[in-house]
Structures are given as structure tokens and as C-alpha cells.
Image (spheres, helix red, strand yellow):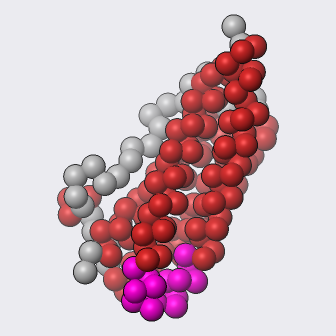
Amino acid sequence: MKLPVYLGLLHQSEATLAESYRQVAEGHGEEPDVHFLCLTLARQCDAHQDALAPIIGRYGECTEDDEPERLHHEGLSKTRSGPVGLLRDLQDLYLMANLVDITWTMVKQAAQGLQDAELLDVIARCDGETEVQLHWLKTRMKQAAPQALIAAS
């Protein structure tokens, strides 16, 4: 069974996304909505990791050494400054959140095949929150784009 590979990917991806949200919150403190919402979304990712703990306890989790090559994403190394920097940082978060989202989808497929009600309950809560994160990121990027791409000098 290879489910532990994807559980490990999901666990690590949620941790990376949480840390990246925190980094963007600190790096863009001049944008109060970004600052406070990114901190809230980081806490959601932390809660997703906590929710996965009993599942990982049951099925296991592959370490990075056991994962297929390139099956993880590095977080943000630093935040950028200015309107274009904010847009790029939000875009990076969006890409990471999409990795989390599609990984939840793959794990859901396995959970359905295993008829694992506990895992399906975790997925229903966590994947739904990830979808909301993606919606907010996309909306916030749309809001920031005109300022960053046209008005900023």
C-alpha cells in the first residue's frame, strides 16, 4: 500500500503551507487583511496536521527518503516587497495550496476505496477549508493585480 507516501506528502505540504502563510503575514504586515488572514489560514493548516495524526498513526507516513523524487514543495525562502512582491507571494501560496488540495483529493480516492469513514470525515473538513483558502487567495490576487501591474511604478 502506497497511501503512507501521500499521507507523508500531505502532512509535509500542510506544514510547509502553514509556515509560508506565517512568512507572508510577517512580510506583508502593511496589508492588514493579508497579515491577519494568513495567520488564520496558517492555524487551519496546523489543525489539518493535527487531524491527520491518528490517520498517520494507523497507516504510517513515508519520510522524505522514502518518497519518490520531487514529490514535495519547498516553502517560501523569503517574502518580496511592494505590490508586485505581494502578488508574487500570494501566487506562490496559491501554488502550494493547490498541491495540498490535489493531495487531499488523491487521499480521498484511497479513503473511498478503503471505506475508511474516519479518514473521509477528516478529508471533508480539511479539504473544504483548503478550497476556501484557494478561493481567498485567488480573489486577493485579483484585487492586487491592477495596482501591482498597472499603477505601481
Q: Does the magenta run of residues contain 112?
A: yes
Residue 109 to residue 87: above or below = below
Percent position of residue 34, x then y: 72, 40
Residue at x-position 24% and y-position 61%: 67
Q: Does the magenta run of residues contain 70?
A: no
Q: Which residues are magenta?
A: 110-123
Residue 42 to residue 91: above or below = below
Task: Find the residue positioned furthest to the top.
Answer: 153
Residue at x-position 54% and y-position 52%: 97
Percent position of residue 19, x then y: 52, 48
Residue 42 in which image quadrant? bottom right
- Residue 25 in view: yes
Left or right of residue 90: residue 32: right
Left or right of residue 83: residue 14: left
Residue 80 to residue 47: above or below = above
Left or right of residue 45: residue 152: right
Residue 19 to residue 129: above or below = above
Residue 132 in which image quadrant? bottom right
Q: Quadrant of the C terminus?
A: top right
